[in-house]
Image: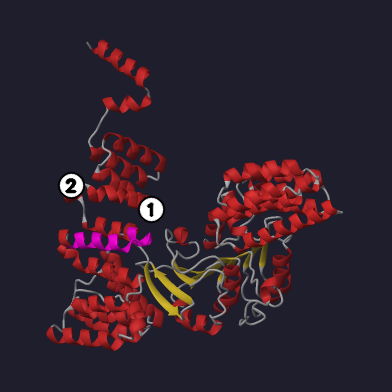
Amino acid sequence: MKKMLKKCIKYALNKFGEINIGIFNKKKPSFYALKGKRLIEKNRIRAAIKTFKKGLYFYPNSLLIHREWARYLMSINEWEKAIYHWEFVFKSKNKKLLNSNDFLNASDAYIHKNQYEKASRILEKGNKAFPFYKTEYDLNQINILLIQKKWKLALDFLIENQPPNTDLNLRYIYKKLNLYKHVKRVLRANTKYSLEYKEISEAYINLSIYRKNWNAAINRGKHLIKQHSNLSIEILMKLGMLHQIIGSHQEASGLFKRIEVMQDKNTQKHQKIILFDNGESRIEFYKKSHEVEKVIITFDSINMEWDKQPFGFSLLKKKNIDIIAVRKRKKQTYQQDLTQEDFYNTVYKLMYFYTDKIAYGFSLGAYSALYYTSLLNCRILSLAPRLSIHPRYGRKNYISKYEFKHNLSIGYNDSISPVIVYDPKNKIDNNFVTREVMESFPNAHLVKIPYGGHRIAPNLLKMGVLKDFILTFIEGNIPSYDRKLKTKSPSYFRHLGTECLKRGKLEWANSLSNSAIELSPKNKFVIELKVKVLKEKNNYKDAIDYTKEALKLVPRSLYVRLILIDLYIETEDIINAEKELQLSLNKFPKRKILKQKKEEIGEAINDLKESNLN
């Protein structure tokens, strides 16, 4: 009988293929959900997704499987894909399987995709299912109104849900409607009824922290500690951080020791307080829930903004280190609104708490690390320092567009030895390092990466050594660059190939461009180099064919489309130039550069007409 069954199974597998294997191993939905979750925890993402897919093959509407997949997608900020799975979750009839966080997480996904009505409805359902979590749901409802700038509606919601039903985390409402006095009146009114109600005191503390009134928050905190023995770790953390900010290190140390007894080190996370905010720049303080010896100050690079994580945060948050992050509100801004004095006055008392003070950044952030933290005598890791608007060392086409407010010179300091990682072949970076950095820091240690380009940090990341570079420095050592790694760097091949092209060494340039393509076939600058080499060899047909193939790899790259349009114009293939321009306009209708290309095609047509007449 057993032999017969095995033969039947073998026949079915051969006949119907791999997908039917599971028919004989079909498990309950909870099995696939739990297995996928555990695989994600072990960072076996592909295996987890395969498990989810297998489970949904059997149970296409399973709440449990869709929920676990949605949770994972949210952890990597794939909001739209997460929403797809949340839709199945909330259509399910088994909503008793949901917990309070599921409603919060799902609403968060909808908020990120600007689907505010759906987010609000999810929260309303959560409020009915879990009335004990009303405060959290109410705060999220208020945040939805804030995002939409519906200040009056948010105020109405505040009045209807007065403390202690909300922690008054409504900074935008306060700012827009100047509601500080109103909030204080609400708090005082509640205090009359219950002087010892801890949520009211916590609301005072949160409001004082928002207003940067550290002493008021600390005084209220002292009253709170006297009255209550069961305070949350979060509020104790804030009070410890406040003492640290004003320089009361003994009091801070006592609170952190108290927290350490309450919490498992493996579950400790950073608590955040915004130390400084002038509307364009912020200084954020992230504190581990126990005492640490090291603090690192990070600086945003040019394309970062404060709504995202600080520079290097995903790596640093796992280490036993506190973080001070200097942030920018918008991309492509140069932190000219933040003075050295404001920076120093904000953090200098805080820094006395640490025996090892570190700073690092890339490009603009690397320049900022040198400019600001040299005042604190930090250990500095500066990756390709550059300030493109600097009157002496910047880029000519940038200097006139921005107002320069920093000091022309960083300032002399021979007490520290910052580590400067840069490409000596890059003219702008080399000029700044040799003429400014070495003059300001005569004991600086230089780590040279020839032909590494300006984008040193991303290139080290592609080579797989950026993490080790940073951790080596944090541990107190000077990172070194192994020249053998250049074979893993598309940037090295591209920059060296560009140099060879300038010097007329076409075969070398061609070989180097091919090596760069092997490592990074989708990189627009690598594609551009290959096209330039082919053009220089007067091989326009191959240049066009190659660009068309490259465009299949990066169909959303306007940069590569422009290269193809230029090739058609240069070869007087106006029909294909116009065709490619129209395809580009369909994908990028608002890009001004395409209007310029349209004019160039028009000029090319006129030139052809004139040449035909002659």
Residue type highlighted by circle 1: Glu
Residue 69: give x, y in percent of width and height: 33, 46
* Residue at numbered disc 2: 93
Which quadrant of the structure image shows residue 349? bottom left
**Circle 2 residues within 10 Å: few <14, some 14–19, many ≥20:** few
Residue 194: give x, y in percent of width and height: 13, 83
Question: Which residue is located at x 82 percent, y 56 percent?
Answer: 610
**Circle 1 residues within 10 Å: few <14, some 14–19, many ≥20:** some
Please state, as top left, top right, bottom left or bottom right, where the N terminus lies in the image: top left
* Residue at numbered disc 1: 80
Q: Are marks 1 and 2 in contact (CB under 8 Å)?
A: no
Residue 416: give x, y in percent of width and height: 61, 73
The secondary structure type at the circle numbered 2 is loop
Which quadrant of the structure image shows residue 413? bottom right
- Residue toward you, 139 or 311: 139
The main secondary structure of the magenta stretch is: helix
